Image (spheres, rainbow, N blue to C red):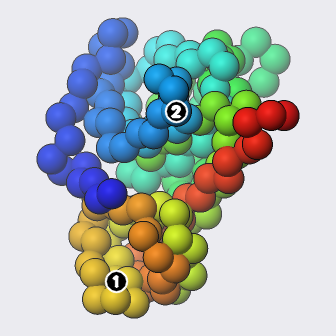
Amino acid sequence: MRFDATTAEPVPWKNGGGTTRELALQERAGKLLWRLSLADITRNGPFSAFPGVQRIHTIVGGRGLDLRGADEVLQARPLKPLRFDGGMPLDATLIGGPCRAFNVIYDPAQVQADMVVFAENIRAAAGDILYAITSDLTLSDGTILTEGQGMRCPVATEAATVGSAVRLWFTSLPEDR
């Protein structure tokens, strides 16, 4: 599976605060396991809630934002994955203007997800997802992902970049838990 943010259609948010480009998703028996998206956040306001899922939100453009909940403020800063409950009601306050975020939502009853941002070389296992943030990402088989492109690795690979990129992996949980 390969995806490209530059060809994914932007969908306006219902509240008018930005757009989302869906990059990839996986379902099991008609239920969402996980979804990857790229969001352009253009103004302050309510942050979409996704009850029943977990989120990993990573700022990949702009200075970031603060997400204010009833009891806490979550700080979303560039290239620092922020993990939180997708159902939490939050209001976003931009820091110094619009920003872009690489988002993962996933069903924690079905899978676990983890993400790292890297800026040199990394080893990715079969099934991992790689996404080029700020420059080309070159895989050991010669595949090149340009900025905004990603793929699910069919086999284990080495990846190198001179900019920033994301490695994301999912671990399926037993269905009989």
Q: Secondary structure at mark 1?
A: strand
Report the side of 58 relative to 36 (left or right).
right
Question: Dot 2, how many residues are within 10 Å of its Cα: few (below 14), some (14-19), or many (20+)?
Answer: few
Structural distance between the alpha carbons of marks 1 and 2: 31 Å
Q: Residue at x 76, y 43 (%)?
A: 174
Question: According to the image, label 1 marks what residue?
Answer: 138
Q: Which of 90/123 is in front?
A: 123
**Kind of residue sitting beneath label 1:** Thr
Q: Which of 74/49 is in front?
A: 49
Q: Against 27, is 124 above or below? A: below
Q: Against 99, is 151 above or below? A: below
Residue 54 visible in the shown view: yes
Q: Nearer the viewer, mark 1 or mark 2?
A: 2
Question: Dot 1, how many residues are within 10 Å of its Cα: few (below 14), some (14-19), or many (20+)?
Answer: some
Q: Which disc is residue 28 wearing? A: 2
Q: Which of 61/102 is in front?
A: 102
Q: Which disc is residue 52 wearing? A: none
User: Where, by quadrant of the figure, is residue 20 drawn?
Assistant: top left
Q: Which of 7/124 is in front?
A: 124
Task: Give x and y (percent) for residue 158.
Answer: 49, 86
Task: Give x and y (percent) for residue 141.
Answer: 34, 89
User: Where, by quadrant of the figure, is residue 72 drawn?
Assistant: top right
Q: Residue at x 52, y 79 (%)?
A: 156
Report the side of 89 relative to 18 (left or right).
right
Whether label 1 touches label 2, CB < 8 Å = no
Residue 101 visible in the shown view: no
Q: Secondary structure at mark 2?
A: strand
Q: Residue at x 59, y 58 (%)?
A: 169
Task: Give x and y (percent) for residue 34.
Answer: 52, 38
- Of the 4 image quadrants, the one containing the N terminus is bottom left
